[in-house]
């Protein structure tokens, strides 16, 4: 289980997270919702070690992550799919996937067949440069690259952003399959309400750097939840 307890995070004098506490359990999809600029991506940067926290504790399966470098968190089983995909445009699809070998022992350095079962288009494009793929294909590649690291928790930052509806459905099916077949934890940051409503086992809503609502996905239809999600 991932545990975030009373975490604060600052960018200089600006406070992005205010006493944020969430949990993401194994075998469950946890979705964090909120408008732009409320701290969702900052929460994921704290979890993955991309930015140090000012206060609070983060642990994963009993291991304290405070002060741990991002590459060490990857070795602990945290797979990260960043907002905007951040694939390597001049590397081939195969080479992009192989960058996921970094935290693995030499004997484990292979591309899992699940990557191609979930996203068959990647197999047919192994020799193509990442920058030549469509936005949706790049998103599939970014998820595939994270899966190569053999994560125990998959952390995704707005995977539906700018993606065509057919690929959004493919990504949804992949996330559901990973939860059900592998038992990994999924921590998903999203703005697409229907996507979270269909997938999530538990939801959090953030506003102004704090968690203002949590509960099962059915609670997204309450007046309280909608008040924090409407623009």
Image: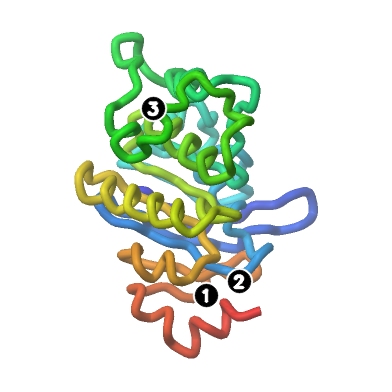
| Nearer-the-camera pick, 178 or 54 | 178
Count of number-bearing discs:
3
Q: Is residue 62 visible?
A: no
Residue 220 percent location from the top left of the image: 43, 79
Disc 3 packing (10 Å; few <14; some 14–19; many ≥20):
some
**Does the residue at mark 3 contact the one at mark 2 (Cβ under 8 Å)?**
no
Question: Which is nearer the N-term, disc 3 or disc 1?
Answer: 3
Q: Compared with residue 69, is residue 208 higher up or lower down, i.e. above or below?
A: below
Residue sitting at the far front: 124
Numbered disc 2: secondary structure: strand
Q: Compared with residue 59, is residue 208 higher up or lower down, i.e. above or below?
A: below
Which marked residue is nearer to the observer: mark 3 or mark 1?
3
Q: How much space separates mark 3 and mark 2, taking CA atoms?
A: 40 Å
Query: Which residue, given by chain and number where applicable, does mark 3 sit on?
Result: 123
Quarter of the image where one finds residue 98:
top left
Q: Which mark is residue 26?
A: none
Which marked residue is nearer to the observer: mark 3 or mark 2?
3
Residue 157 percent location from the top left of the image: 53, 50
Residue 85 percent location from the top left of the image: 58, 40
**Does the residue at mark 1 contact the one at mark 2 (Cβ under 8 Å)?**
yes
Query: Which residue, given by chain and number where applicable, does mark 1 sit on?
Result: 212
Q: Which mark is residue 207?
A: 2
Residue sitting at the far right: 13
Q: Compared with residue 107, is residue 178 higher up or lower down, i.e. above or below?
A: below
Residue at 59% across, 47% down: 83
| Nearer-the-camera pick, 163 or 17 | 163
């Amino acid at each position: 289980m991932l545990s975030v307890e009373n975490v604060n995070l600052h960018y200089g004098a600006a406070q992005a997270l205010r006493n944020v506490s969430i949990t993401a359990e194994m075998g469950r999809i946890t979705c964090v919702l909120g408008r732009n600029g409320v701290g969702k991506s900052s929460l994921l940067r704290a979890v993955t070690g991309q930015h140090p926290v000012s206060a609070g504790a983060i642990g994963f399966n009993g291991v304290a992550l405070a002060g741990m470098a991002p590459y060490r968190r990857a070795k602990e089983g945290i797979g990260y799919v960043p907002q905007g995909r951040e694939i390597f445009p001049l590397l081939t699809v195969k080479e992009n996937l192989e960058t996921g070998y970094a935290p693995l022992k030499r004997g484990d350095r292979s591309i899992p067949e699940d990557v191609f079962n979930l996203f068959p288009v990647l197999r047919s494009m192994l020799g193509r440069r990442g920058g030549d793929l469509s936005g949706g294909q790049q998103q599939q590649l970014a998820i595939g690259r994270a899966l190569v690291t053999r994560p125990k928790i998959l952390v995704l930052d707005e995977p539906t952003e700018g993606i065509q509806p057919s690929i959004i459905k493919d990504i949804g099916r992949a996330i559901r399959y990973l939860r059900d077949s592998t038992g990994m934890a999924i921590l998903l940051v999203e703005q697409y309400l229907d996507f979270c409503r269909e997938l999530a086992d538990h939801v959090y809503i953030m506003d102004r750097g704090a968690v203002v609502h949590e509960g099962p996905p059915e609670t997204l239809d309450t007046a309280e939840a909608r008040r924090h999600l409407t623009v």
